[in-house]
Image (cartoon, helix red, strand yellow):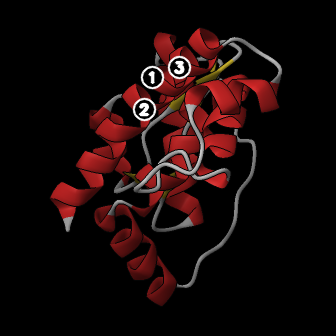
């Protein structure tokens, strides 16, 4: 997304773009229907964004737009998108690790015990957790820096 186009329409990107199955998704906030239409037109005129499609639109009262902006600066949308960065199996293994107490002190379950419950090898469970942590921890740090 080009920031020049966003600036011309006073639109804001509310969260980081998410790519799934080769398709980029972005949540944008425009101050009016007119500005959103202008944004779509400007994007479609730009070769790089010619295939942009509006998937959903919602109208927001001005006072709610201020709240959305506060959510953006607080890191809420970063946390919301955290789930999107994990592969389904990484999310499943991470969720089970949390649920069974792997991250508690002291640990309530070991990698070996967790792998038995999930029906996979300890090295696979450890790899899924490392990958999930490597994706989630930078997002968490970004949010903490905003507080």
The residue beneath circle 1 is: 130
> In the image, which is nearer the foreground, mark 1 or mark 3?
3
Q: Is residue 53 something that shows in the picture?
A: no
Q: Is residue 76 above or below residue 39?
A: below
At label 2, counting other C-alpha atoms closer than 10 Å, the crowd grade (few under 14, some 14-19, many 20 or more) is some
Q: In which quarter of the image is residue 58?
A: bottom right
Q: Name the residue under label 3.
A: 126
Q: Position of residue 55 (x, y in %)?
A: 75, 42
Could you tell me which residue is drawn at 57 percent across and 10 percent down? 123
- Judged from the image, the secondary structure of the residue bearing numbered disc 3 is helix
Q: Nearer the viewer, mark 3 or mark 2?
A: 3
Residue 61 versus residue 51 in the image, above or below? below
- Residue that label 2 marks: 133
Q: Quadrant of residue 70 in the image?
A: bottom left
Q: Do the residues labelled 1 and 2 touch (CB within 8 Å)?
A: yes
> Which of 56 and 99 lies nearest the eye of the viewer?
99
Residue placed at 54% from the left, 54% from the top? 80
- For disc 3, the neighbor class at 10 Å (few under 14, some 14 to 19, many from 20) is some
Give me the C-alpha separation between circle 3 and circle 2: 10 Å
Q: Are marks 1 and 3 in contact (CB under 8 Å)?
A: yes
Observer-nearest residue: 11 or 65? 65
State which tag comes first along the sequence, 3 or 2: 3
Which one is nearer the viewer's eye here, 80 or 119?
Answer: 119
Q: Residue at x 29, y 36 (%)?
A: 3
Residue 25 at x, y percent in the picture: 60, 33
Using the rendered image of the protein, determine whether residue 58 is visible from the camera's viewpoint: yes
- SS at mark 2 in the image: helix
Q: Is residue 82 left or right of residue 66?
A: right
Task: Tell me where residue 127 appears, x and y as whole percent.
Answer: 52, 15
């Amino acid at each position: 997304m080009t920031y020049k186009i966003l600036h011309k329409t006073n639109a804001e990107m509310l969260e980081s773009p998410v790519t799934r199955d080769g398709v980029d998704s972005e949540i944008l906030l425009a101050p009016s229907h007119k500005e959103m239409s202008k944004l779509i037109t400007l994007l479609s005129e730009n070769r790089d964004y010619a295939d942009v499609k509006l998937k959903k639109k919602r109208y927001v009262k001005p006072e709610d737009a201020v709240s959305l902006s506060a959510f953006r600066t607080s890191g809420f949308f970063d946390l919301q998108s955290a789930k999107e960065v994990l592969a389904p199996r990484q999310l499943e293994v991470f969720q089970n690790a949390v649920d069974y107490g792997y991250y508690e002190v002291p640990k309530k379950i070991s990698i070996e015990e967790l792998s038995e419950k999930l029906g996979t090898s300890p090295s696979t469970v450890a790899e899924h957790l490392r990958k999930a942590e490597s994706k989630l921890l930078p997002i968490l740090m970004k949010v903490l820096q905003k507080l």
